[in-house]
Image (tube, rainbow, N blue to C red):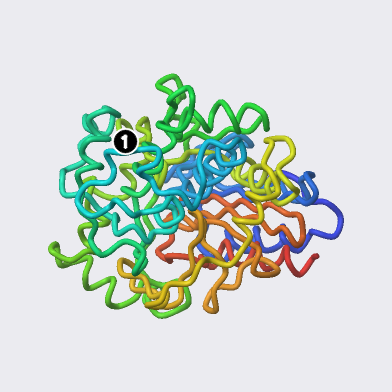
Amino acid sequence: MTIEGTVAAGFEPVREEFERNFAERGELGAACAIQVDGEFVVDLWGGYRDRAGTRPWQRDTLATVYSSTKGVTSMALAVAHSRGLFDYDALVTKYWPEFGQAGKENVTVRQLLGFQAGLPTVDTPLTPELLADADRLGEVLARQAPAWEPGTAQGYHPLVGGLYVSQLLRRVDPKGRLVGRYLAEELVVPLGVEFYIGTPPTLPDERIAELVPAKPSLRDFTTAGGVPTRMLLEFMLPWTLTAKSFGNPKIRDITDLGRRPWRELDLPAGNGVGTARSLAALYGEFATGGARLGVDRATLRAIEADPVPLGTGSRDRVMHLADARFSLGFWKPFPAWRFGTDGRAYGTPGAGGSFGMADPATRSGFGYVPNRLGRRLWNDPREAALREAFQRCL
């Protein structure tokens, strides 16, 4: 297996683990990039971008990163927050009055971003046509009743939560942009990276890695990051909150999000397409102070702070995880998953194994993207091996 790219002196163990991913952990094609103090110390790619193993992964190969998109969306919101467009602790209705229907009048922006608003799903079927109509979609979302009293519990919002965030941004942004366009113009261009929420029709299919589902393994359900038993059971019961949350929009399987028409829509929680280098550069910018994007220190402090605790504890009502911690759209370290150097770290994993994170303590940004999909919710063994090797190097 040919491994391309570079590592800086002292970070050779990351390359060794990247090679082991292909030799021992079933990797098909992947890339890993890490920035420290704004400079790449790891920039690796290898394997194949197709199932048949005929097209080598290139330096600019793009991959669908699923829920790792949420972190990129949250960074876009942080840029808007730094520019005074909204307050994390303000009511959503301050900016979007129609949102206050059906018991949502007291939801704050912080609760919406932290999966505490009770909005992991919506009763109306989310077709591509509805998702492409921002006005009509906004009306549907505003009418939705929460699944629990907002602010009293948390439950992961797989895809619908990102739609609410985009509608909120559309109302506070002077140009009325959804997340995908705001990201492209306010973050991607200034940093010179390539990341899309809603791919342009002109983007060639061959640049995007083919997604290949993984074969199930018992370890995927019995080790850290595996799917909890109750979550697995509720997936199969269509009336449960878990099944409803992951079942709308209705797609054949998760790989559909990487295909047209789904990948061309504004789905800020799940259809991001980009490179590991772009994830590392975005998180690296935040980890070093965000000066190039104009992120202010107050915004960074809010992201780095511990999440505001819930009186009912932090067990997640959708994924049924104990002690999972979320804040302002990001995952934060918790006892079962201590990524980063200390509690200031933040990031988001994606279905299949992708991960992006910022570690302010080491001024580093990390990005990993594969095309053979793993089945862990977090802490995919391929990604974990790379991240842990990097931390040992530090």
For the point 69% across and 36% down, which residue is it? 294
Q: Mark 1 points at which residue?
A: 262
Percent position of residue 309, x then y: 48, 72
For the point 53% across and 39% down, which residue is it? 274
Q: Please, is residue 345 above or below residue 137 in the view?
A: below
In the picture, residue 231 is in which quadrant?
bottom left
Residue 10 in sight from this viewpoint: yes
The quarter of the image holding the C terminus is: bottom right
For the point 34% across and 75% down, which residue is it? 228
Q: Residues within 10 Å of mark 1 (few under 14, many from 20)?
A: many
Percent position of residue 170, x then y: 41, 31
Q: Please, is residue 118 above or below residue 336 in the view?
A: above
Q: Which of 19 and 365 is in front in this view?
A: 365
Q: Please, is residue 43 above or below residue 301 in the view?
A: above
For the point 31% across and 61% down, which residue is it? 150
Q: Nearer the viewer, residue 38 or 165?
A: 165
